[in-house]
Amino acid sequence: MSRSVSVAVLIAVGILSAGALHIGSRDFSAAAAQQKPAAPEVKIDNFSFGPATLNVSVGTTVTWTNHDDIPHTVVSSDDPKAFKSKVLDSDEKFSFKFEKAGTYPYFCSIHPKMTGKVIVQ
Amino acid sequence: MAAKTTEKKDELLHDHNHDGVDRRGFLKCMAWAGTGAFCVLRGGVLRSYALSRLPELGSKEMAGELSFAQISDSHMGFNKPANTDVVGTLKAAVDKINALSVEPEFLLHTGDISHLSKPEEFDTVDQILKGAKPKDIFYVPGEHDVLNDDGKQFLERYAKGGKGAGWYSFDKKGAHFIGLVNVMNLKAGGLGSLGHEQLEWLEDDVKHLKHSTPIVVFAHIPLWSVYPEWGWGTEDSAQALSYLKKFGSVTVLNGHIHQTMQKVEGNVTFHTAASTAFPQPQPGKADSPGPMKVPAEQLKSVLGITDVNFVRGQQALAVVDSTLA
């Protein structure tokens, strides 16, 4: 189960890095051979998190990147907070490794209408 | 009266400042430079005029018991294409304030002083505002001023005597001014928030005041529902306003949305100020409320929102002018 999930994630990462249309099979097999941990990215764009819901396996590091002209944050909505970024200016990133299964809702504490969640299985 | 001046504004292409630049030329090169509002309390009623319109106003409009100027959203540190010179546009606002024939008693800054809460951003604004003739400046924080440190720096710099996260009140010439903080402890999916402690303080703060006391409330995020989908509202503002129902004249001044809007609701007049830094889209007219890059030829339409002015016949609570800047 966890193997098929991580393969799916690798494919998703491959699509992202290859620019959607062309996936180099060489890249894919090389990544798979090295058993690299998947590093899915959430894009912050136009005052929203994309994807708003992200499914990852336990042990995955997720990276958020702010593509807006305005600063944002990535802050867990749980109490106590599972994670909290510092303020991310344009093009800055925040990463967090999810060690435990569960659903992790989060939001931008500056623009609280912006919400998302990470589902860890 | 307001309608008349609004019409006049659009025809006005002459050199009123005698500086060799007509209005259209000024707009093209300066965009929103010098945005802010001149407020005058007259007969207990607050009137607000965009600074860009002042050369057209006579001494009659500017006279009153008390006058002050509001500036907002200077976003010091912002350097994206929507405005790469926020220092210049803030200085232009100060120049306009200094050029007023009636010197305002004080300034109000309704938040987002800085873009990233950096000490050097606050320092730059402080330095520029030292050049303003009015020496008293009252601030409330925007969400950009309380990043990373829960507002400690803001409190230390701008609201030392304040309660809680920096709310306070003061009296000037018979009017009662209340600075509120609605950018702290925001909840996922929510709007601006005042919180229980501040609401209790507010109820107590106004309890002893006479009903005839003019009340001026200022806070960063609008205390009315401008556009909740973009977070342009405050979730517990209704409760705050309920404490002010007994007063005959209540004015609420906000920033945050980077455009001027006015609304009258019962005894309360709401105003939002333009930003000195960059404009934002009209509610729902874009995918998000991010900074708007305005080509010169579109500038007029963007700034034309002023026509939303809400005026109530002869008993206008606010003869509000719109901004062309």
Image: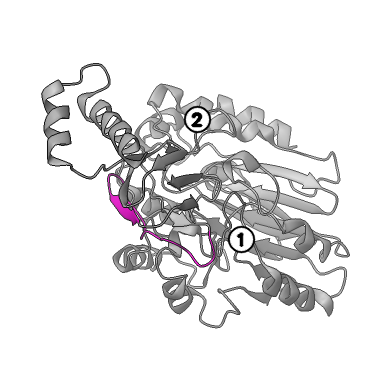
In front: label 2 or label 1: 2
Residue A95 drawn in magenta: yes
Judged from this view, the residue extending furthest toward the bottom is B161
Is residue B137 positioned above or below B95 on the image?
A: below
Q: Which of the pair A119/B173 is nearer the observer?
A: A119
**At label 1, which amino acid type do we have?**
Ala
Percent from the top left, x then y, of residue B141?
Answer: 51, 64
Distance (Cα) linking label 2 and label 1: 26 Å
Is residue A65 positioned above or below B205 on the image?
A: above
Q: Quick check: do tags 2 and 1 share a chain?
A: yes
Residue hosting label 2:
B287
At x 58%, y 79%, the residue is: B162
* Residue B282: quarter of image: top right
Percent from the top left, x then y, of residue B53?
Answer: 56, 42
- Numbered disc 1: secondary structure: loop
Judged from this view, the residue extending furthest toward the front is A1
Residue hosting label 1:
B219
- Please say whether residue B93 is visible from this viewpoint: yes
- Numbered disc 2: secondary structure: loop
**At label 2, which amino acid type do we have?**
Asp
Disc 2: which chain?
Answer: B
Q: Which of the pair A17/B172 is nearer the observer?
A: A17
At x 36%, y 35%, the residue is: B20
Q: Earlier in the sequence, mark 2 or mark 1?
A: 1
Please report the bounds of the magenta region as a residue range. A78-98
Q: Which of the pair A6/B224 is nearer the observer?
A: A6
